[in-house]
Image (cartoon, coloured by chain):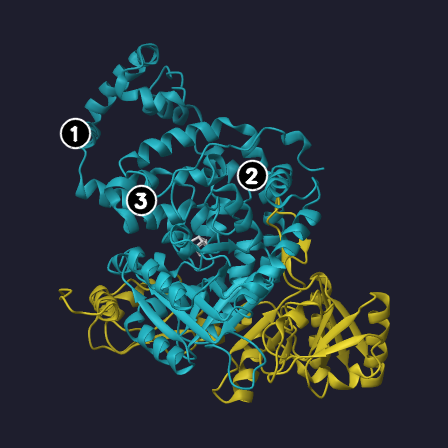
Amino acid sequence: MSEGAGMSAREVILARIREALRVPAPLPHGLAEESQSQVRQPQQRAAVTTSGAASAGISVAHPSNRLPSLTVLPEEVARPWLPDGGETPAERLRLLIENLGKLRAIVQQVPDLTAASDYLFTIARERDWHRVAWHPHPLVEPLLAGVPCATYRVDAADFDKNALESCDAGITSCEALVAQTGSLLVSSATSGGRALSILPHVHVVVATCDQIVATLADALHAAQARYDGHLPSMLSFITGPSRTGDIERILVLGAHGPKELILILVG
Amino acid sequence: MIVNDLAAPSVGHPPATETQPPKLAKKRFLHDAAEHVRDTGHRAFVRKALSGYYASRDVQKARFRDWEHARDAASLAKWSAVNQLDELLPRFVANFEANGGQVHWARDAEEARTIVLDLVRAARAKAIIKSKCMTSEEIHLNAALEAEGYGVVESDLGEFIQQLRGEPPYHFVFPCMHVRRDEISDLFGKHLGTPPTDSPEELTMIARRHMRRLYVDADIGITGANFLVAETGQISITENEGNARLTAALPRVHIAISGIEKVVEHLDDLAVLLPMLATAGAGQPMTCYNTLYAGPRRPGEADGPEEMHLVLLDNSRTAILADPEQRDSLHCIRCGACLNVCPIFKNVGGFTYGTTYQGPIGSVITPHLRGLADWNHLSGASSLCGACTDACPVRIDIAHHLLHNRRNAARTAPNAWERLGHRLFVMVARRPWLFGLGGAVFRRTLPLLKAVRPPLLRDWLASRDLPAAPRQSFRRQWDHRQSQQPAVSREGSA
Ligand code: SF4
């Protein structure tokens, strides 16, 4: 296809892509060899199974000889092969705590919000915090009552990044806790925007045990279901305190984000 | 405490840049490779830096219930996305725009630079903060911004160190892995006026303190993107330090730059790709922050940029797409695993390649991006061990693609000597009597060859020794052994 004068960059690039894809690529490694001849047959709907994956039912249906369309999503296919996320709530709780420990996050289990509030009071004292930032949320607000320092409420009406920068800690809720990897899923909707969970030196997350899910996919599904297609402008999996290995590949915590990640797990 | 035994200075000569005349690329490569290989201190340092990676990568791989099959699924996700790019890219763009983002299409590096410069001018930017973005290295964005008088600060610690050193990244995931801590201490002392220290922790804190105000004061944040999610119109950014999160949170304008091949179809695909990227690339269960952005700040959200722009870059990616045999090199998720295991990378170092993307995958794609004629020498930067292919989480057969490039180069610009040599060999190998005669002649003249070093062999002999000539041909030895050791020994050893 010629790239005619007057075509926009968008048109040119899309034309190049269409042109390039006219010749089909071989199937990826792992898809059965013998199926490839079928796939190349035009106008034939061929289901091919991967050699090693047949038992899991991975299949790729080809409506034409060019466009592959997957009848099973890669995530469904991969689920039994990815790291374990636990089958029962107890297993998930154990995995979550174990994984967070390896990531050098701090986990405190408390029976109720009063105990959570006491714990926050203690760590604020211990660490000599002068000011903590928080956002209005049913899990966060009750904890702030007795905190032994100044507070800054992050608010859509008047957000002040300088005020936030001066805070020692940010206290947020989260969307979900992922047992599989020890990740916490936060969002701009339930964690006070984008900066509250990343700018202060310590990030305290308050969550309940029923927020624990097995896998990353489960966490994403939960968010999609909650927001019904209108996802918040930021969703972030946080997996341990900020870190870097840029100097001689030696691990240092607290590169630009929080040096400490503290999870208060209620219930 | 770790490097006392490695006191040799890291290789200090300026790396090859992409603006050099391409004809020099091969010469430069050979020269730099020879120099790095001789620098045993540097090689030992790089190996040591990587040793922790190998250990943690193996630990994390073992957490997968089946790593090898998970690689199949990951490659399937990328394969189906890349092969449907004509549908998925427009779908991504429509959803990204519905989220309030603005898309800019760039055919090549120059167009991409112009787009970013226009955005920066329109925003009347005073300060620009940037998080790690290899596409921006590819288009030489910093130089273009600086030429227009805009200050831009790299916020990723490794990139920041490289920026102060005036060097491009040494490794596209570990940008300053070749730099010793005392050099970093000196560098910070010189540029930031900080006292010397040999603690990586303290050095990191110096950068942390230095950068905090810059995030707050910058009016533009520039980032890359690791994945573009077609079904939701989100871009996904993977990082460890939190600098990309800050860059996309505090400045008024967020500009992301991404290659067009980064599209995946489903949000779910990330549930496979993110842990695999982290495990293969850095030996982590997940990289510390994996963040999905869907447009600028929403009404009711506390903060976030007012504008979000995405520059979609072709820059010869469609040329790779047009080659069905090597199309899968666009599946690359830039984890860096193939560099970390490559014996060539570990011995010649990252700068020797003279490319934005170093190591095996860089050797595969650079000839596509910048011309096979001038960059085919990278196809030879391989020991044919296949370690890269084994390491790749999305199962790109990198090692064979290097061979494909060699074949393509031989096809497009045949080398008369090589062809003559092959023809001669075919002629000889087809005639056992001639083969035997050739062997006999060769066995006798080998010592002579060693002494004379004819010009044709000189390059080859420069780093190798010819073996001592055997007294008998292989066939003779074989017959002899067979007659001495009947079938019993085979059974015995089985
Ligand atoms: S080619 Fe594979 S191993 Fe190399 S960087 Fe890309 S994804 Fe990683």
Q: Element under label 1?
A: helix
Q: Chain of mark 1?
A: B
Q: Is residue A78 visible?
A: no
**Rendering coords of residue A1 (x, y %):** 14, 66
Q: CA distance from mark 1 to mark 2?
A: 41 Å
Image mark for residue B403: 3
The residue positioned 34% from the left and 38% from the top of the image is B380
Which colour represents chain A?
yellow
Query: Is residue A146 or residue B50 the one in the foreground?
Result: A146
* Residue toward you, B85 or B279: B85
Of circles 3 and 2, the one toward us is: 2
Residue B246 in the image: x percent, y percent? Answer: 57, 66
At x 40%, y 71%, the residue is B309
C-alpha gap between disc 3 and disc 2: 27 Å
Relative depth, front residue between B253 and A199: B253
Mark 1–mark 2 CB contact (< 8 Å)? no
Q: Residues within 10 Å of mark 2 (few under 14, many from 20)?
A: many
Amino acid type shown at disc 3 = Leu
Q: Position of residue A103 (x, y in %)?
A: 69, 62
